[in-house]
Amino acid sequence: MKNTLYTLLEVLIVIVPVLLAVAFMTIIERKQLAAMQRRVGPNTVGYYGVLQPFSDALKLILKETVIPAQSNKILFYLAPVFTLIFSLLCWGVIPFGQGLALSDFSLGILYTLALSSLGIYGILFAGWSANSKYAFLGSLRSTSAMISYELILSSAILIIILITGSLNYTKIIEIQQSVWFIFPLFSVFFFYFMAILAETSRVPFDLQEAESELVSGFMTEH
């Protein structure tokens, strides 16, 4: 029982700061986009609008749950859960310092790539389970795009694996004590960074959920 509580505490110590970081990165992104588009952006909730992400989260929690009558209700509920769980599980092998990792897995990179690939199923199920042709077409578009971006992402990571001869995050970090790989491999990092933006549907790679074109794509009914 004591070990279980200790493990649960470790998981919370990792997950809570990650979720908070996502919330504040969201407000930073919205502020930056507003500045680029000559808009005000969030500025009412909290000082300079910094509490807007928490207000949005509370709004989503309190909103009425509307499920399409002809949808597959089980998959409709589970689709976003799949994507969230797979994304959070990836943090289990990320080392935050010397000995500061939930699991110092020897195949950490392979584990991360596998989970990121499984996250695609959540998007596919989200579109298919809604029984809406618009959501389904959006999910197919998003899935094909993510698979394409995964190839670029995996190719960039493969170069690091070939250089270090390891799939362990801790060993790869220790090898970079003399020089960070970002300097000699800056061109690879550029493609890797672009693939990350595309994989997470950030601007200008937000084609999967482009509201002006697809009415939020695979999330149309969610």
Image (cartoon, grey):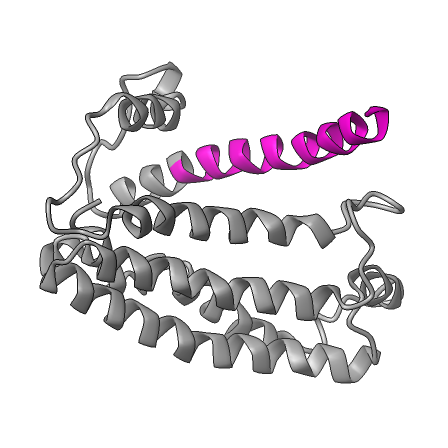
Which quadrant of the view contains residue 176? Answer: bottom right
> In the rendered image, which quarter is residue 21 located in?
top right
Q: Is residue 187 visible?
A: no
- x, y (%) of residue 138? 20, 65
Asked if the stretch drawn in magenta spans residue 143, the answer is no
Q: Main secondary structure of the magenta part?
A: helix
Residue 52 higher or lower than 70, as above or below: above
Looking at the image, which is closer to me, 142 or 192? 142
Q: Position of residue 155 (x, y in %)?
A: 58, 83
Q: Is residue 175 above or below residue 102?
A: below
Task: State the quadrant of the N terminus.
Answer: top right
Q: Is residue 200 left or right of residue 215?
A: right
Residue 70 image point, x, y percent: 11, 51
Residue at 68% over, 71% down: 110
Q: Is residue 151 left or right of residue 77?
A: right
Quadrant in the picture for the C terminus: top left
* Residue found at x 41% / y 65%: 120
Which residue is depicted at the point 57% across and 47% down? 88
**Region in magenta:** 1-26
**Where residue 105 sits: x, y (%)?**
80, 60
Q: Is residue 197 above or below residue 4?
A: below
Residue nearer the viewer, 182 or 149:
149
- Is residue 155 shown to the viewer in this render? yes
Q: Was residue 8 drawn as part of the magenta stretch in this picture?
A: yes
